[in-house]
Amino acid sequence: MAINERVRRMLLSRSGGYCMRPECHCDLFPMFETGEITSVEELAHIVGQKADGPRGDHPLPLNQRDEYQNILVLCPTCHTIVDKNPEQFPDDLLLGWKAQHEEKITTCFGVPRYDTRAQLNKAVLALLIQNRVTFETYGPFSAKWTDPLANAAAAWARAVRTQIIPNNRKILELAVANSHLMSADELAVIQAFRLHKEALEFNHLSGDKDANAPLFPKEMNNIFGVKNA
């Protein structure tokens, strides 16, 4: 039997291109100085592919051992260590590595749903602070704005597209996904923020301008704990 291409693609996608061993996480597709990209990923069986393989003495049927749930992605070094020392790396440990790694990848690109308000505040606060620092550095009320050599308008326009708008989208997604942690008054502020977000995107991405675009609601800073806002 062999691991089919469908399973391989899914494994590489959900690995994010990094070794799934928590102590390693090395890049599986390093680039040489010449610009060439090499590939060092290895698909490692959690329960050995054969009965006499590493961790192979397991009730998992042989015809299921090349399936997605029984394989994780490792670099060559970690693969060798894991398979040469199966007693130190039992199947439940490897399953835990895989689950934790995939959760990290999902968290990076998905929208987490938190259990506590403190977790939500921490996530949103980081994004609000990034936006605030960028606004104070390049925005229309910054010291650079009146400096003809700074070209602040162009820098601000670029910052809005590359940081402010993406961060605003993340903030709104986090708020919506975690609305169970917010009061009715706070959700009203989130709605005001939504209107601001949409107008900002219209003004910077559509090629047109809305002179009545609502400003950023300062209450956002208060409800998520931005100090001295």
Image (spheres, rainbow, N blue to C red):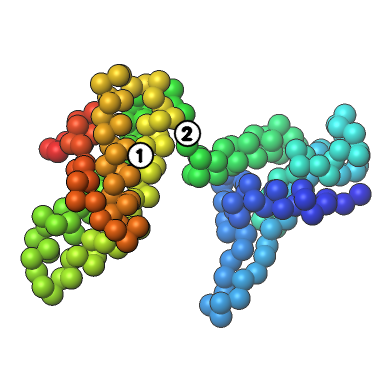
Q: Which mark is residue 112?
A: 2
Can the viewer see residue 79 in this picture? no
Relative height, residue 6 to residue 35 (above, below): above
x%, y% of residue 225?
23, 32
Instruction: Report the mark closest to the observer, 2 or 1.
Output: 1
Alpha carbon distance from label 2 to label 1: 12 Å
Q: Is residue 224 left or right of residue 227?
A: right
Give the residue displayed 35% in from the left and 47% down from the top. Answer: 167
Give the residue displayed 90% in from the left and 34% down from the top. Answer: 61
Q: Is residue 132 left or right of residue 126?
A: left
Q: Residues within 10 Å of mark 2 (few under 14, many from 20)?
A: some
x%, y% of residue 154?
23, 67
Q: Quadrant of residue 189?
A: top left
Give the structural element (helix, strand or loop) at label 2: loop
Q: Which residue is mark 1?
A: 171
Give the residue displayed 30% in from the left and 19% down from the top. Answer: 183
The three-letter code of the residue at mark 2 reads Pro
Of residues 38 and 86, the one drawn nearer to the viewer in this rendering: 38
Q: Is residue 169 left or right of residue 213?
A: right
Of residues 6 and 219, the one drawn nearer to the viewer in this rendering: 219
